[in-house]
């Protein structure tokens, strides 16, 4: 400010005095609280912004008095010791008061500028000392435009210290810094405060959004470098974006056929406020289309592009459909899977998420399958390969009169292929190999992820899963013998399940005893222990159960389910021969954001949920028709069966909203309630589509055609298992209308429901991933976008409301690795709700999973957390999962992989908890690990 702030001013009537309060100066001198000094500072800021004559007006005088009193009232709300407030805190109160009042941006900026200048004077540092910034040319650093932007971006946020952000940034920049580096420094400075106050996540997201907007806007009109128009409505760029994307072959020219003026008006750029910092950073790093390393689309343009890509086949109605799809995903009520977000509206719209294949038992078939893996992975598909049909080691090879080397060497090749084809450079290729428990090579297979042994017989990146028949689990419980076979010597066993498998397997055991076929016997419990020891040591193989997947499959008439997918939630049948009619199973995924469908009273907004699901199922079904298929077998299967997989995310957040602990009967009941609703509305939506467009091609003969719903197939499993199952099969909704409509209209999709991990799309939506419990209440998450401080906003709000949030609580959280259990100040009722994943008995995760599973025609990516694993605990847990009717499990996550840095609170460079690891091995590129 050009005018020095005076120490006193003539008495002003109406100023609120706090006679008992003291102010601690920077030199530790204590003086009486003086509202006149606050008034004087505000008055001078008004003069700088509006001129001397403006402040003489009676209305302005009254306004400035009111602002001064707002500051004093805020002081009364502070928790201070001996009614003493330090000068910095008081000045922050003035700053926040100015910023939180409408139309005072310029006044606030001048006040902040004054504080900034005074701080520099105290540190004997000139504001522009030898610092120049590389814009389009080298220019002296001018803080004023940056200060103006940062002040505007903090509008409506109560606790943002713009002065601190600017001052810290200035200390960190260097002479010759580029403008991009300058803005990155600003973002990082804001990001460091997220752990102190989650509001800084919103502030950092606004800064990041501004930076991205500048980059994109500059691409089109060369305007950037602290443009003061922070509220730029970039919907006006949609037409330019489509034209530019088509020109450079980045998006399909079909998007030019839409009414771009209409869709520009439908775009709502204010929805960017829904995005957290991690959301925007993730979109920037992974999803927004770029040209010459510059992003040419912005978040709402991105959502619209995805919607347009899905709506292209709707003829004259495509513009309204695009708007309908856009509003669903841009509101974050539902989110498409990553391949759909990557590729919708592009020249190669490979939108499907998962591909399941069965590898044939011949050399041509094996390498054809590996080649298909490469083609599918190129466009972001996740892969599940069934290798159980390939003959075991030592088997006879007729063509060469030699012996087979078994499955494992080929898996090494498949592993290398997944790494070589890294999904277009956007994320690492990912594949999971499945092998059944009776296969001759199972003992070597379960050791594939070990770090010791012959490297040629190891797969250090490929995931592995054990496809376990019920008969094996029964023999584990009975502690009886298990027999291993090579599939070429036991024809039909690969495709059999249930009672047929048990009968066929027993007959082959008799032949083996007679020496008519090659076999190996092992104690079932001994093999089970070997499997679990590898799960504990390497995180693999995942434990998946063959019979419940097949007995409950709606598509039993079309073949056998031989495996699940990369993340164990998809259960679709695949061809097991090498005929021209081979099918590669395909699933198209998306997830409902449960948080956005919760009412303030903790109940589910059923009407909104129903509407969201109806549109979501239509979007998923549309993927099948507009999809680009890199191999013909995928197109054959997808268009014949039309499977989709609707899931959910934000389950843990919903429990926080309801104030329910994950390890409780209430959480189990809520798992049941919300999944039944989602299942009900999803099946209803697919029936509605069948009424409009017809049933899927292979409908006749399916369980659907027999009016058998998922809850009925659960009862079929109960009947088959007899004493080896303990599940709840109750209903709370009236399913009779669904049965009547299904009988009348049929259904559009062979499979409808599957719960995926939602690792990345939950970042976009700013909610907890899938059905997982909270990993920690405070930690740093690592992924391709860098490291991000994550604080449990629900816990923060709960502690703040209780008057418990302070630096001591933050330090305690860090020391205790994000756990609240050992912090004595926190009440037990809060501790109970905010247990971390490793503080919850994993039995409760299985209980919740069992209640969800009964409503799913497919499966769920169910991670299991165990703080201190042991052989007995693991055996009990996985046997309980099998007895609870689960079809699959996913990662076993162990506490031994995590380590907290217990550092001081004041040193922000060290002020963090170490990155979380998702399983017993470190895999930062894994979608689930994110």
Image (tube, helix red, strand yellow):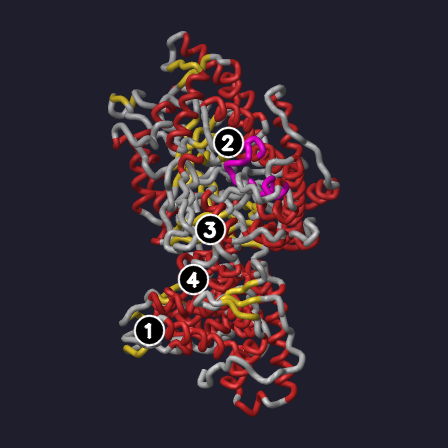
Q: Earlier in the sequence, mark 1 or mark 3?
A: 1
Q: Earlier in the sequence, mark 3 or mark 4?
A: 4
Q: Residue at x 48, y 57 (%)?
A: 194
Res. 288 mark: 4
Say whether residue 328 is left or right of residue 443.
right
Res. 760 mark: 3
Classify mark 2: residues with Cα within 10 Å, few (<14), some (14-19) or many (20+): many
Q: How far apart, in angstroms, are the residues tagged by discs 3 and 2? A: 31 Å
Q: How far apart, in angstroms, are the residues tagged by discs 2 and 4? A: 39 Å
662 lies above or below 318: above
Q: Which residue is disc 2 drawn over?
A: 560
Give the x, y percent position of residue 614.
Answer: 64, 53
Bounds of the magenta segment: 829-844
Say whether residue 651 is left or right of residue 279.
right
Q: Residue at x 47, y 33 (%)?
A: 867
Q: Which structural element holds mark 3?
A: loop
Q: Which structural element holds mark 1?
A: loop
Q: Main secondary structure of the magenta part?
A: helix
Res. 621 mark: none
Q: Residue at x 54, y 72 (%)?
A: 94
Magenta region includes residue 332? no
Q: How far apart, in angstroms, are the residues tagged by discs 1 and 3? A: 44 Å
Q: Are marks 2 and 1 in contact (CB under 8 Å)?
A: no
Q: Residue furthest toward the top?
A: 514
Q: Mark 1 or mark 3: which is in front?
A: 1
Let me know if residue 244 appears in the view.
no
Q: How far apart, in angstroms, are the residues tagged by discs 4 and 1? A: 41 Å
């Amino acid at each position: 400010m050009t005018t020095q702030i005076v120490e006193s001013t003539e008495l002003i009537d109406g100023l609120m005095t706090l006679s008992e309060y003291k102010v601690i100066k920077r030199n530790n001198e204590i003086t009486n609280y003086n509202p006149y000094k606050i008034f004087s500072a505000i008055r001078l800021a008004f003069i700088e912004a509006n001129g001397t004559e403006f402040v003489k007006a009676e209305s302005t005088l009254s306004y400035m008095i009111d602002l001064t009193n707002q500051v004093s009232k805020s002081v009364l709300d502070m928790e201070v010791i001996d009614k003493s407030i330090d000068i910095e805190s008081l000045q922050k109160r003035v700053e926040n008061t100015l910023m939180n009042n409408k139309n005072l941006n310029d006044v606030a900026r001048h006040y902040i500028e004054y504080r900034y200048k005074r701080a520099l004077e105290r540190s004997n540092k000139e504001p522009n000392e030898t610092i120049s910034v590389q814009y389009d040319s080298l220019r002296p650093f001018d803080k004023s435009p940056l200060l103006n932007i940062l002040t505007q971006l903090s509008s409506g946020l109560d606790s943002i210290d713009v002065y601190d952000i600017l001052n810290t940034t200035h200390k960190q920049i260097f002479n010759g810094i580029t403008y991009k580096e300058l803005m990155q420094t600003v973002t990082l400075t804001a990001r460091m405060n997220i752990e102190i106050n989650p509001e800084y996540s919103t502030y950092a997201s606004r800064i990041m959004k501004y930076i991205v907007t500048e980059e994109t806007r500059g691409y089109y009109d060369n305007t950037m470098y602290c443009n003061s128009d922070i509220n730029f409505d970039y919907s006006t760029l949609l037409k330019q974006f489509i034209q530019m994307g088509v020109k450079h072959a980045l998006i399909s020219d079909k998007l030019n056929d839409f009414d771009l003026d209409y869709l520009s008006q439908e775009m709502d750029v204010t929805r960017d406020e829904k995005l957290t910092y991690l959301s925007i950073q993730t979109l920037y790093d992974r999803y927004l289309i770029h040209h010459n390393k510059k992003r040419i689309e912005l978040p709402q343009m991105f959502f619209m592009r995805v919607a347009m890509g899905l709506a292209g086949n709707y003829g004259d109605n495509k513009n309204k459909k695009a708007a309908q799809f856009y509003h669903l995903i841009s509101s974050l009520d539902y989110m498409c899977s990553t391949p759909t977000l990557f590729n919708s509206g592009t020249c190669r719209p490979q939108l499907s998420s998962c591909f399941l294949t069965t590898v044939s038992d011949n050399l041509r078939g094996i390498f054809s399958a590996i080649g298909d893996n490469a083609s599918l992975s190129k466009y972001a598909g996740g892969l599940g390969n069934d290798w159980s049909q390939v003959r075991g080691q030592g088997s006879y090879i007729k063509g060469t009169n030699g012996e087979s080397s078994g499955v494992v060497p080929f898996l090494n090749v498949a592993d290398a292929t997944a790494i070589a084809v890294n999904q277009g450079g956007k994320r690492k290729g990912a594949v999971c190999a499945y092998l059944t428990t009776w296969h001759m090579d199972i003992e070597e297979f379960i050791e594939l992820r070990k770090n010791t042994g012959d490297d040629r017989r190891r797969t250090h990146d490929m995931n592995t899963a054990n496809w376990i028949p019920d008969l094996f689990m029964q023999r584990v419980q009975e502690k009886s013998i298990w027999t291993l076979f090579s599939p070429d010597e036991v024809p039909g066993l690969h495709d059999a399940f249930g009672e047929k498998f048990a009968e066929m397997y027993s007959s082959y055991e008799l032949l083996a005893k007679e020496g008519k076929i090659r076999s190996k016997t092992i104690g079932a419990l001994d093999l089970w222990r070997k499997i679990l020891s590898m799960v504990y040591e390497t995180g693999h193989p995942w434990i998946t159960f063959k019979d419940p997947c097949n007995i409950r499959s709606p598509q039993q008439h079309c073949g056998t389910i031989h495996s699940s997918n990369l993340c164990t939630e998809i259960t679709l049948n695949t061809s097991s021969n090498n005929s021209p009619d081979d099918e590669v199973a395909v699933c198209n995924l998306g997830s409902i954001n449960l948080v956005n469908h919760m009412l303030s009273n903790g109940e589910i907004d059923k009407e909104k949920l129903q509407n969201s699901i109806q549109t979501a199922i239509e979007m998923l079904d549309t993927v099948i028709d507009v999809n680009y298929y890199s191999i013909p077998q995928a197109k054959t299967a997808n268009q014949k069966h039309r499977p989709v997989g609707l899931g959910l995310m934000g389950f843990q957040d919903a429990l926080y909203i309801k104030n329910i602990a994950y390890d409780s009967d209430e959480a189990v009941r809520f798992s049941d309630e919300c999944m039944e609703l989602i299942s009900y509305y999803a099946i209803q939506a697919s029936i509605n589509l069948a009424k409009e467009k017809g049933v899927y091609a292979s409908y006749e003969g399916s369980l659907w055609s027999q009016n058998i719903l998922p809850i009925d197939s659960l009862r079929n499993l109960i009947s088959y298992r007899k004493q080896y199952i303990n599940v709840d099969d109750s209903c709370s909704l009236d399913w009779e209308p669904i049965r009547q409509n299904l009988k009348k209209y049929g259904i559009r999709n062979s499979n409808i429901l599957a719960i995926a991990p939602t690792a990345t799309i939950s970042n976009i939506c700013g909610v907890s991933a899938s059905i997982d419990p909270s990993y920690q209440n405070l930690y740093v998450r690592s992924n391709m976008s860098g490291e991000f401080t994550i604080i449990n906003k629900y816990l923060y709000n709960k502690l703040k409301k209780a008057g418990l949030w302070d630096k001591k609580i933050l330090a305690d959280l860090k020391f205790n690795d994000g756990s609240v259990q050992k912090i004595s100040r926190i009440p037990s009722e809060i501790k109970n709700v905010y247990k971390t994943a490793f503080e919850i008995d994993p039995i409760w995760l299985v209980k919740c999973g069992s209640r969800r599973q009964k409503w799913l025609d497919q499966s769920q990516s169910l991670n299991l957390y165990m703080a201190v694993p042991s052989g007995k605990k693991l055996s009990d847990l996985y046997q309980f999962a099998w007895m609870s009717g689960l079809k699959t499990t996913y990662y076993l996550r162990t506490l031994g992989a995590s380590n907290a840095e217990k550092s001081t609170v004041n040193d922000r460079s060290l002020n963090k908890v170490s990155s979380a690891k998702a399983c017993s091995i470190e895999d930062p590129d894994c979608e689930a690990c994110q």
